[in-house]
Image (tube, rainbow, N blue to C red):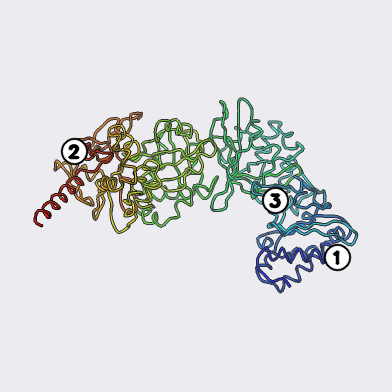
């Protein structure tokens, strides 16, 4: 008796059954029957896997029974759980092939026993998983035996019911094992839901590209449905090259087996035009496909076109078909029209929530976008809005409008331009929101590079870049900018511009306090380039600031930069306060910080800056220090990123290989005097 739970126990049970059945010269039908009877009294975890439902269907099919009794075969058996998810009829013979294949013996295609012998496509993923069409073979549950006729038979348990291409009940002609071209020509008679292909079919014939779709082999075909041609002029843009861009030759991609965002070469890939296609899945489960025109021409501009898959994984004789909501490669809408297409979950559902928030805020933001001749939008994904910190802000129209405007840039900014801006510094770009800048950073290199953007205290990662429109670009990001979701410490830890300050605070234990949500901090954080400047000014002292042996002194310097009060001080607040006094006095951990804040015009942010703007300047101890990024909001305070630390040469004394702040020297002198007095009194 086998006692246990989970797949490992089930595998042992199946193997035991395999040996006993082999000895009795049974067949897979007996094996399935035994498993289904056994499952009636086993644990629920067994029962959801055992193929009870499939065995009952198998019993009713005389062809399948004859195959199992007389021939070698491989049978792909869906679990009961797979049947619970499945809708529609089950085609038993589509799950059987009349040759025995272990997992290692499965080739790229095997012929099913269904009428016309439509192929089953085998995909082996990088992590070792094996898929039959869109169904994964569950590891360790395969069984091999010999039937009474001495024929080898193999059973693989799969996690999805296999679905062949079938005709509608009203179809007038018999339909068996169609290729992609026949599918397009007979689409109105096939079971593909309400999706129509008449527009694309007519363009295919007009461009004489039929041979692309009836080519032998195994390919992936992307077919835009009629819904994607609501813009009446769009069909005229479907030329021969666009049709090529909808085919991935010599590669069959089913969605479950697809590698996320892995570009595949399309049939439109030559010297003058290079188009790749890739698949990706949203967190809500929706699958999308995108074309990326890497090298374009006058008719086919560069950029990404995104399309939702409306019906996936339709197997045909020469590959697989995915029906998509709109054609790829065609860039014929403005940014405003693109956003409006999300209404009622239209062309793409990926930014539906973003549009809803824009419209709920009064629609003025959309009007502003529409008035821009060139524009780039950082658009938060649907999931980005599902945080409690946003719920109350959404109801505040004025603040929400400011936040939305933080996502809008008045120029065409694709990834290539971001890379160029990042060549000498972390790229900074002004937004429609007055005095708000976005800061781009590229982490890593090549295909693995990740692009982040910071705005209003929030770091977001670009999930999908360069979605091209006629007047600009849309980049889909994973967080809403301007709505903080991390503490001062969290921001310090994750922002690449503040890594030196974070590192200094870690070894001196200064950072420990910055996670306290009961306090309100205003932290003047020198950016990394600011600390690098001190290396030129005070080389010996700079070295020691980042050494653990001098952690006390590093902590002392950092405490000067941290204001602790019952509220935060924005740069606007400090500039207003500076109008009535020579020095604004702010409470710090040990003492107080005295400064004056003014607004000045010019290249305040970097010597490489291409724009002039008005920014904030701190005057501290007769030194002028530019504020590189003001008002970076956090959940327990605010950060002002400054160009240079609040540090002077007299703060540092270097002697005998050490240095210490002036106040520490005073304390030591006082201690020496007290010791001398004590000795004198004794």
As helix, strand or loop, the secondary structure at mark 2 comes to: loop
Q: Dot 3, crowdedness within 10 Å: few (<14), some or many (≥20)?
A: many
As helix, strand or loop, the secondary structure at mark 1 comes to: helix
Kindly identify the residue that appears in the image at 68 percent across and 50 percent down. 192
Kindly identify the residue that appears in the image at 48 percent across and 50 percent down. 382
Q: Is residue 480 left or right of residue 627?
A: right
- Is residue 89 visible to the viewer in this orientation of the structure? no
As helix, strand or loop, the secondary structure at mark 3 comes to: strand
Mark earlier in primary sequence (2, 3): 3
* Disc marking residue 345: none
Between disc 2 and disc 3, the foreground one is: 2
Task: Point out residue 423 in the picture as x, y percentages from the top left corner.
Answer: 43, 31
Residue position for label 3:
131
Q: Dot 1, crowdedness within 10 Å: few (<14), some or many (≥20)?
A: few
**In the picture, residue 83 is in which quadrant?**
bottom right
Residue 68 against residue 227 in the figure, above or below: below
Q: Is residue 127 left or right of residue 335?
A: right
Mark earlier in primary sequence (3, 1): 1
Task: Point out residue 180 in the picture as x, y percentages from the top left corner.
Answer: 73, 41
CB atoms of marks 2 and 1 within 8 Å: no
């Amino acid at each position: 008796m086998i006692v246990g739970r989970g797949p490992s126990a089930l595998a042992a049970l199946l193997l035991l059954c395999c040996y006993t059945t082999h000895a009795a010269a049974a067949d897979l039908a007996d094996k399935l029957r035994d498993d289904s009877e056994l499952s009636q009294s086993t644990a629920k975890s067994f029962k959801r896997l055992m193929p009870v439902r499939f065995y009952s269907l198998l019993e009713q099919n005389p062809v399948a029974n004859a195959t199992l009794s007389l021939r070698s075969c491989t049978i792909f058996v869906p679990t009961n759980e797979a049947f619970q998810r499945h809708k529609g009829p089950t085609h038993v013979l589509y799950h059987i092939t009349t040759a025995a294949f272990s997992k290692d013996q499965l080739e790229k295609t095997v012929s099913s026993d269904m009428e016309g012998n439509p192929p089953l496509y085998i995909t082996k993923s990088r992590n070792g998983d094996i898929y039959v069409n869109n169904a994964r073979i569950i590891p360790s549950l395969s069984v091999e035996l010999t039937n009474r006729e001495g024929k080898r038979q193999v059973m693989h348990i799969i996690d999805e019911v296999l679905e062949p291409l079938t005709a509608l009940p009203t179809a007038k002609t018999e339909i068996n094992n169609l290729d992609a071209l026949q599918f397009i020509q007979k689409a109105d008679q096939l079971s593909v839901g309400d999706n129509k292909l008449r527009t694309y079919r007519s363009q295919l014939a007009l461009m004489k590209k039929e041979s692309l779709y009836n080519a032998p082999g195994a390919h992936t075909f992307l077919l835009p449905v009629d819904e994607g041609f609501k813009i009446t002029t769009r069909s005229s843009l479907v030329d021969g090259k666009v049709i090529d861009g909808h085919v991935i030759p010599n590669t069959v991609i089913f969605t479950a087996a697809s590698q996320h965002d892995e570009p595949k070469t399309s049939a439109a890939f030559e010297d003058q035009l290079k188009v790749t296609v890739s698949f990706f899945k949203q967190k809500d489960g929706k699958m999308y496909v995108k074309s990326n025109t890497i090298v374009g021409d006058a008719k086919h501009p560069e950029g990404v076109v995104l399309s939702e898959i409306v019906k996936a994984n339709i197997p045909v004789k020469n590959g697989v078909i995915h029906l998509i909501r709109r054609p790829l490669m065609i860039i014929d809408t403005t940014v405003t029209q693109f956003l409006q297409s999300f209404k009622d979950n239209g062309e793409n559902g990926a930014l539906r929530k973003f549009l809803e928030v824009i419209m709920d805020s009064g629609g003025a933001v959309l009007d502003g976008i529409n008035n821009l001749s060139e524009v780039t939008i950082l658009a938060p994904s649907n999931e980005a809005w599902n945080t409690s910190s946003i719920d109350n802000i959404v109801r505040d129209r004025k603040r929400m409008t400011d936040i939305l405007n933080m996502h809008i840039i008045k120029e065409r900014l694709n990834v290539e331009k971001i890379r160029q801006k990042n060549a000498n510094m972390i790229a900074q770009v002004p937004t429609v929101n007055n005095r708000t800048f976005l800061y781009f950073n590229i982490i890593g290199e090549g295909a693995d590079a990740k692009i982040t953007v910071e705005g209003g205290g929030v770091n977001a990662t670009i999930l999908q870049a360069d979605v091209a429109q006629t007047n600009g670009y849309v980049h889909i990001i994973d967080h809403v900018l301007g709505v903080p979701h991390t503490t001062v410490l969290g921001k310090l830890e994750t922002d690449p511009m503040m890594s030196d300050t974070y590192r200094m605070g870690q070894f001196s234990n200064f950072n420990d306090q910055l996670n306290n949500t009961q306090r309100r901090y205003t932290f003047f954080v020198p950016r990394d380039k600011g600390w690098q400047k001190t290396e030129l000014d005070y080389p010996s002292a700079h070295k020691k600031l980042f050494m653990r042996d001098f952690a006390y002194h590093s902590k002392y310097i950092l405490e000067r930069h941290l204001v602790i009060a019952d509220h935060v001080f924005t740069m606007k607040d400090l500039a207003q306060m500076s109008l009535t006094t020579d020095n604004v006095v702010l409470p710090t951990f040990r003492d107080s910080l005295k400064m004056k804040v003014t607004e000045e015009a010019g290249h305040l942010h970097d010597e490489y800056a291409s724009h002039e703007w008005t920014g904030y300047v701190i005057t501290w101890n007769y030194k002028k220090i530019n504020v590189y990024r003001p008002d970076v909001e956090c959940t327990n305070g605010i950060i002002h990123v400054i160009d240079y630390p609040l540090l002077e040469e007299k703060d540092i004394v270097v002697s005998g290989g050490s240095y210490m702040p002036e106040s520490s020297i005073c304390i030591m002198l006082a201690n020496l005097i007290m010791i001398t007095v004590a000795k004198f009194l004794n």
